[in-house]
Amino acid sequence: MQLDRIVAAFESGVTPLIRTDFGNDDAWQAVVAQVSEPVDFAVADSDESGADSYAPNVTIIDDRAFEGVDARMLAEAIGPAGEIVGYVLLADSRSMSEVCAAGLTLDYVDLSVMGPEDAELFRSFTGRSFRVAVGEVAGIEANLAIANMDFHEFADAAAPDGVFRGFEAAAFHEPVWPVEREAGLSAASAVLADLTGGPAARPLHGQLGEVVLDREFKGTRTRLFNRVGYAYGWPLSMGASGNGSLEVGSEVRHDATLPDAEDPYDRQGEIRTRILEVDKPSRVVRTWNWLLPTPATSTARSRGHKPLLERDAVVTVEFTKAGSPREANLTRVRVRVVGIPAEWEADFRALWAWDIARLAALD
């Protein structure tokens, strides 16, 4: 991967907008147009609308050398203590599909962290990313450019589905916790204790277990599929990298931290998922594995992480119509997780119950 153009952009004080999907030229042009469109920062009731119009300071990189590149790959190319300092926007396959259907998001990637001290100071790491609604790009780019705000402030304010839609939206959703949250937090703490070897750690003997969970939610199958279909059993705290679209082959690495922690930097590796099957709006099947950190990869994303499971677990989420004919908007969601440590069965039941409940509650 050639990083010269990214380096040149950072040296010029601009943010690279990098194309990583080359299947639709018209979609790419629409992405560029929407990202480049000026945004009015004026107060809503001001008589000077337009006076504070600002267009994001981005430079376009349309080069097939970046095809399929994601945040993790950029972090690996730079290294944990690289001298490339800045932020990039990735327009991936999800972006291309969203721009055609409205609701464009992009992947905002932090490449500004130069080592463990910076990581702790700025509560981030090389390759940390979050998805951002296109209307928020200008505000983020402007604040990062003048160091008025830090990357983690935006990443931490992303909605439960991983998308930053503004601080007002984040504040609106934050107080609304599902009742499953407390049990989920306890389960997450127990799992992390097992992995870190704390006093309460349970030995994992290598036996594999299975979890089956059935819940009913208000809403059509399509609505629930478009929300709960993104569940992976470990509610997001710091971010993720990869292609998060609901398409066969899409792979994501989620940060394995304590969900909703006050200081979410304490990562214990990553949770890797890859979609095997999609039948919208009925079913989605994905693999699941925990990638344990090694001393050499404790502060940076790397292929050197060691999988916890010899074979990936498989998660199947199915959506079926529930209730009587009069209850048209009621959907049954069934989650089946096969191949996790047997000691974690009760914990995973609590975690998945929390994860699907929070996603089902999204507007």
Image: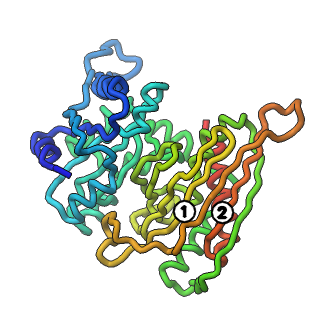
Residue 115 got which mark?
A: none
Residue 113, how many percent across, how many down? 24, 59
Q: Does 343 appear above or below 17?
A: below
Which residue is tagged 2?
Answer: 337
Disc 2 crowd rating (10 Å Cα; few below 14, some 14-19, many 20+) is: many
Residue 209 as seen in the image, left or right of residue 11: right
* Quadrant of the image occupied by residue 179: bottom right
Picture residue at 81% right of the left edge, 31% below the top: 328
Task: Kindly indicate whether the residue at mark 2 contacts the one at mark 1 (C-beta within 8 angstroms).
Answer: yes
Using the image, determine if residue 307 lies above or below residue 280. below
Q: In the rendering, at what x and y percent does residue 257 appear?
A: 47, 65
Q: How many marks?
A: 2
Picture disc at residue 288: 1
Q: Can residue 346 be seen in this view?
A: yes
Q: Give the percent coordinates (x, y) of residue 146.
A: 20, 41
From what the image shows, is residue 357 above or below residue 142?
below
Label 2 residue SS? strand
**Looking at the picture, does residue 1 appear above or below residue 262?**
above
Side of 3 where 27 appears, left or right: right
In terms of image quadrants, where is residue 14?
A: top left
